[in-house]
Image (cartoon, rainbow, N blue to C red):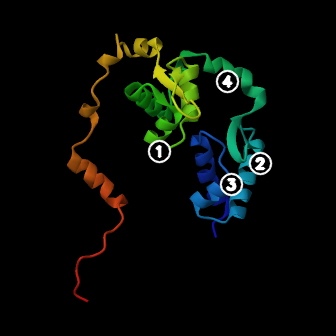
Amino acid sequence: MAEVTDLLPAVEAILFVAEEPVPAAEIAEVLEVPREAADRALAALASGLAERNSGLVVREVAGGWRLYTRPDLHPYVERFAASPTAGRLSRAALETLAVVAYRQPVSRAQVSEIRGVDSDHALRTLERRGLIDVVGRAAGPGAAALYATTPLFLEVLGLRSRDELPPLADHIPPAGVVARLEEPFRPEEPSSDSSA
């Protein structure tokens, strides 16, 4: 069985990249350890951060665990967030922005389906930064909000209109390459060899 100290770096890395609270059961599944081992690792990470006076804390919120900055350091974090160097978008936000740019108007569910992961956080980030906005509602049940890029998006990219976006075909590999990349993920087909 893995020692708690062996699990700490992996638990910390998972919480660092997570965009939403991560349930302890999911951490246990990813690390392939019993739930109790994940719970002990989370507790050890929390106490270790506190002992070394880290700028981070681990908190249980909304049914999962997340890394947060220490509350007493928020004035510094806010000052940094207002600086020019803090303006970079995460990979998830960039992927989401690309989906919206090429498929607009597009709903939250459509973006998540295309990306294969929940995109709520990335959409909120892009909306907060003024790069996308709700431009209407979809017909049908629920009337989902539809997102599109804003004039600020065009300004940041130096484009006059969306028509100047580079064609997607320039960035899609040939069909043979895609087939080779997908091959390991396809279920094995039964053998046609009938010699038994």
Q: Which residue corresponds to mark 3?
A: 24
* Outermost bottom residue: 196
Q: Which residue corresponds to mark 4?
A: 77
Could you classify mark 3 by the number of other residues whose Cα lies within 10 Å: few (under 14), some (14-19), or many (20 or more)?
Answer: many
CA distance separating discs 4 and 1: 31 Å
Which labelled disc corresponds to residue 47?
2
Q: What residue do we see at 47% from left, 42% from top?
A: 113
**Badge 2 amino acid:** Ser
Camera sees residue 10: yes
Residue 116 in the image, given as x and y percentages of width and height: 47, 44
**Badge 4 amino acid:** Val
Which quarter of the figure is the C terminus placed in?
Answer: bottom left
**Badge 3 amino acid:** Ala
Image height of 29 relative to 152, above or below: below
Which labelled disc corresponds to residue 116?
1
- Could you say whether the residue bearing mark 1 is in a helix, strand or loop? loop
Give the quarter of the image for residue 99.
top left
- Dot 2 and dot 4 residues touching (CB under 8 Å): no
Residue 96 in the image, given as x and y percentages of width and height: 47, 32
- Could you say whether the residue bearing mark 2 is in a helix, strand or loop? helix
Q: Earlier in the sequence, mark 3 or mark 1?
A: 3
Front label number (4 vs 1): 1
